[in-house]
Image (cartoon, coloured by chain):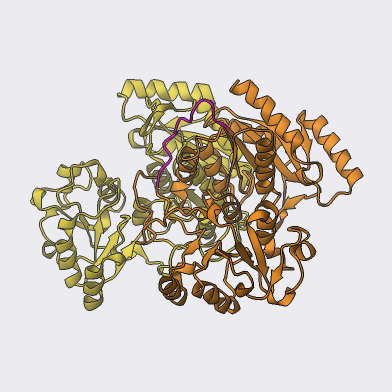
Chain colours: A orange, B yellow
Amino acid sequence: MSTRTDAGVGSQSEPARVDLLGYKNIVILTDGASRSSSAKTATGLLRYRQQDIAAVLDRSEKGTTTGQLFGVGGDIPVVGSVAEAPDADALFIGIAPAGGKLPEAWKPIMLEAISSGVDIVSGLHDFLVNDGQLVAAASQHEAKLIDVRRNREHTVAGHATFPANNLRIHTVGHDCSVGKMVVSLELANELQQRGANARFLATGQTGIMIGGDGVPVDCVVADFVSGAVEQLLLRNTDAEIMLIEGQGSLSHPSFSGVTLGLLHGCAPQGLVLCYEAGRTAVKELAHVPLKPLDELVRLYETVGSLRYPCRVIGVAINGRKLDDAALDEEVGRVQDELGLPACDVYRHGAGVLADAVEKFRAEVIG
Amino acid sequence: MSTRTDAGVGSQSEPARVDLLGYKNIVILTDGASRSSSAKTATGLLRYRQQDIAAVLDRSEKGTTTGQLFGVGGDIPVVGSVAEAPDADALFIGIAPAGGKLPEAWKPIMLEAISSGVDIVSGLHDFLVNDGQLVAAASQHEAKLIDVRRNREHTVAGHATFPANNLRIHTVGHDCSVGKMVVSLELANELQQRGANARFLATGQTGIMIGGDGVPVDCVVADFVSGAVEQLLLRNTDAEIMLIEGQGSLSHPSFSGVTLGLLHGCAPQGLVLCYEAGRTAVKELAHVPLKPLDELVRLYETVGSLRYPCRVIGVAINGRKLDDAALDEEVGRVQDELGLPACDVYRHGAGVLADAVEKFRAEVIG
């Protein structure tokens, strides 16, 4: 533990904060990987920034549309080169593979984009700025190389007091990869459509590409996770409702520390519990059973309230394993068992959870 | 969350593990800082590795003994140069200042040591290996530069199963800086004296310098904290009783994530709760009251048991603010209130807690 101001992981200075929402003609690069599960970054961008996407670049799928290829994005074209999207302002790397490596075959495509002055945005662990060839080309053509996951956060959390009219809603879960980002985004969008000053705050690389501001918490040095999240909130206090993306689970044996650093860093009043119906074991740890929902509700409320009083106000069900009838049954079962409103935001929309947020807001803020 | 194998914080390879316990003629450098609170690294080394310490180097205190200067270490001399300790095999940086900066005035002393082939060991955030002048000199004279806090851990915890005869005892606390390292060390020493195969495992820089093996958890990238600790235990399973140094507190608003990553990484069966009597607010956060002990016992047992069933088996009181009568009263009060054995390991020795560990061991391992 320390109050130091340097994480001691290198000598490069903090990357400048870049306005990722300023890009309005994005080409998403998924060349040869559009049909892999790692293309979830592309899918997320197409779903939540459709208006800013000019094209997807995949030579092997050229000529189709994103609607046909990904089931989202409508008539946005799939192209075979950056030149086919002449107004492009950025090339976003559209995959998030385990290992985080940049496919070597993508280098010529990236160099072509850079030579047209197009910025490159990446959430991979292989940092663009560590590639001498890309750095030299970007310098020559005045293009930016933006590594969303590159991070030198070095602020220790100071138990900040947030403005009295800030409502902080945080998605938590029974496991990784159950849809916390999607629930936070859908809730932010629904509340905005209802006229609220609501804002999504990202804590992972895809969320940052979609939402523009965030902290890649899994890449922050341990002592500074809560501090990095606290700083994220402090620069967004003009939003009256913050929807803060969750990570992992307090009961996940590998990532619980990240989850707790984030939970205490964002000091939420309200929690939305996210889970996938039918999942019984921790992701990638088949021998570790998941905890029951009622135990998780008590756990998150107890541990979260150590920082600021909080409670679970709703449940987001990921129903991808269920047909409509089974999902209806699951919603009823969860509502009865936990006494909380529940829905699947993809299948039902986020209305039920937005109602819960508005009711909770009236109660705790007035 | 990820299963990646690179933290993405640079390109240097993992530093080789060095046997710090191999040094038997250590000079501790505290030049001009012996009387500051940051000299706690020196004090810890003098207390727990007295037989390996040849001298302390402080030009302003030259001629005295460590017993006189620090109240520990007996007749070990305080010298004015490395040359006065001709058999020296290593120079250990004896301070742990907030900010972690290396005093510029120490460079000539370090260069003198290096020129005699003496290795340098540092727990500061300013890494020795980032200083070109030190690196060049070390290369020329075949001396090693060892940064205890330099760390490239990149293993995700896998919910490991430990051998059935491994007893894992972890110190936890109500706050930072209450003596978790000291309690773990005193317990390991007491159990060894009773003939047990007990081992201290460090999680901070001073503990690593004293104990030889450990992980500087506060410098590990968030996703890998539990994994780094799990690896530490897996390479020490030949010890029948592991005493794992704790960090921070589950209720500390800045460092709780580190505490939980460590707690779940080491999967203890038994916890020793450490606290300082009379402390009422979180260290350096005067506006944040500390939680009551009974609440902390429930909290650590509930959250710790998510990974492996555990319970608090004893309480270590840091009584530095109390006189003997007040400390006796505190021991009685805590034993009554929590139903757990309690003592101050400095004032009473670790016998009471070692008894608790042996009783617990008979119960859970047999």
Tell me the quadrant of the picture where the N terminus of chain A can be found.
top left
Q: Residue, x 42% and y 55% (percent of image)?
A: A16
**Looking at the image, which is closer to me, B350 or B233?**
B233
Q: Position of residue B43 (x, y in %)?
A: 26, 46
Q: Tell me: B274 left or right of A294.
A: left
Give the residue at the far front of this rendering. A86
Q: Is residue A281 above or below residue A108?
A: above
| Residue B147 seen in this snapshot | yes
| Residue A173 seen in this snapshot | no
To which quarter of the image does residue B105 belong?
A: bottom left
Q: Tell me: A357 left or right of A15.
A: right
**Looking at the image, which is closer to me, B358 or A163?**
A163
Q: Tell me: B194 left or right of A186.
A: left
User: Is the magenta region chiefly helix, strand or loop?
Assistant: loop
Q: Position of residue B288 (x, y in %)?
A: 43, 28
Q: Position of residue B283 (x, y in %)?
A: 37, 33
Circle count: 0
Give the residue at the far right of this rendering. A325
Tell me which segment is drawn in magenta.
A155-167
Residue A238 part of the magenta segment: no
Q: Residue, x 68% and y 72% (percent of image)?
A: A79
Q: Is residue A9 above or below residue B33?
A: below
Tell me the quadrant of the picture where the C terminus of chain A can be found.
top right
**Looking at the image, which is closer to me, A291 or B271?**
A291
Residue A165 part of the magenta segment: yes
Q: Position of residue B282 (x, y in %)?
A: 41, 31
